Amino acid sequence: MIVVRWIRAFVEFWIDFVVGDDWTVAATVLAALLGTWGLQRAGLPAWWLLPAAVIGITTVSLRRATKGTHRPTRPR
Amino acid sequence: MNITVGVATFLAAAIEAIEMVAIVVAVGATRSWRAALVGAGGGLLVLAALITALGTALRNVPLQPVRLVVGALLLVFGLQWLRKGVLRVAAQGWAVGQGEEHVDDLDVPPDRFDWTGFVLSFKGVSLEGLEIAVIVVAVGGAAGALGSAIIGAAAAVVVLAVVGAATYRLVARIPRRALQLFVGALLSSFGTLWAAQGVGVSWPGSDLALLWLVALYGAAGAVLLHFVRGWQLPAAPTGTAPVSGEVR
């Protein structure tokens, strides 16, 4: 039983490490890496794709996270 | 002692050691010093075992797959922090968590060992350490001066570790929320650089691309912070919609 609990905790740790709050971020990074590899194999410039995908998905993820939220009222 | 080999290895190893120390200090300052140092120690132990087991055969270790895996993991984790950093600074301002002030941070378990901090530090140290070992074997082996190469690389690691130890208090003075945002950008930059190198990409400026990646992601974080504040609805009475930044 202890072993099963350890394995479950181990798997949960890695899922949380990779996926976090928004699974679409990890999925986009994976897709961008595949795209980068494809461009590289085709002999095309590929270095720009990953940074562009990173900024794009971070923007989309933040927009989604802020939808319907309010500005804080606490003093800065 | 072959001075030329020693200096060349020192300079090459110093670049890798800067990256190693930057990750350990960043993880220590934002998460847990204990986890960061245990992770760094673990990384060095694994590295010592690898060097002992493989010796000069280290030259044949394929670094590309290692860079791809470590880079991709650092990137996805760094992006989570960049995202959380933007949301939390938008919600609470820059100054929260200054110095030793307690921060209610659900990312870091208060009464348990911080395994996430351990893994981040471990990966950074073992990957950079492996690259230093390969430099030592390649430069020292080619020139027939392995001893000088080892001394040069060891000196670089010691010097950078001392610099890291001397500056960590300065880093700890930076407000925690601001640091989380910056460390997110830093880890994402390392991750982007290594993961792309892992699939065979040659960066403009080689490893110096890290500098413009940090600047790019840092600037993107600042711009997104501005956007997030604009996307939020005006302040509402308590008990209605959630306040931005209330994330895990």
Image: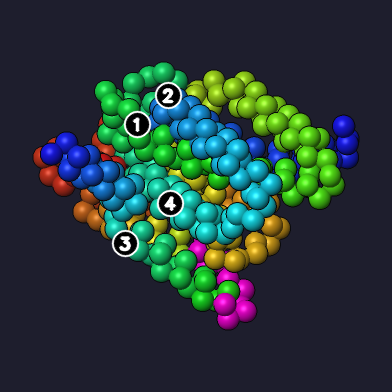
Residue located at (57% from left, 77% from top): A41
Q: Is residue B178 visible?
A: no
Answer with the quarter of the image where residue B127 lies. Answer: top right
Q: Is residue B173 visible?
A: yes
B1 or A53: which is nearer to us?
Answer: B1
Q: Indicate whether A63 appears above or below B11.
A: below
Residue type at tag 2? Arg
Left or right: where B23 falls relative to B236:
right
Q: Do the residues under discs 2 and 1 have CB atoms within 8 angstroms?
A: yes
Dot 2 or dot 4, earlier in sequence: 2
Residue under circle 4? B73
Q: Quadrant of the C terminus of chain B?
A: top left
Residue that extends furthest to the top in the rendered view of this protein? B100
Rounded to the nearest angstrom, the CA distance separating label 4 from label 3 is 15 Å
Q: Residue A24 — which label?
A: 3
Same subunit, labels 1 and 3: the answer reads: no
Residue under circle 2? B34
Q: Specify few, some or many for label 3: CA neighbours under 10 Å numbering under 14, 14-19, or 20 or more.
A: some
Same subunit, labels 4 and 3: the answer reads: no
Q: What range of the chain is rendered magenta?
A: A41-52
Q: What kind of element bears circle 3?
A: helix
Rounded to the nearest angstrom, the CA distance separating label 2 from label 3 is 32 Å
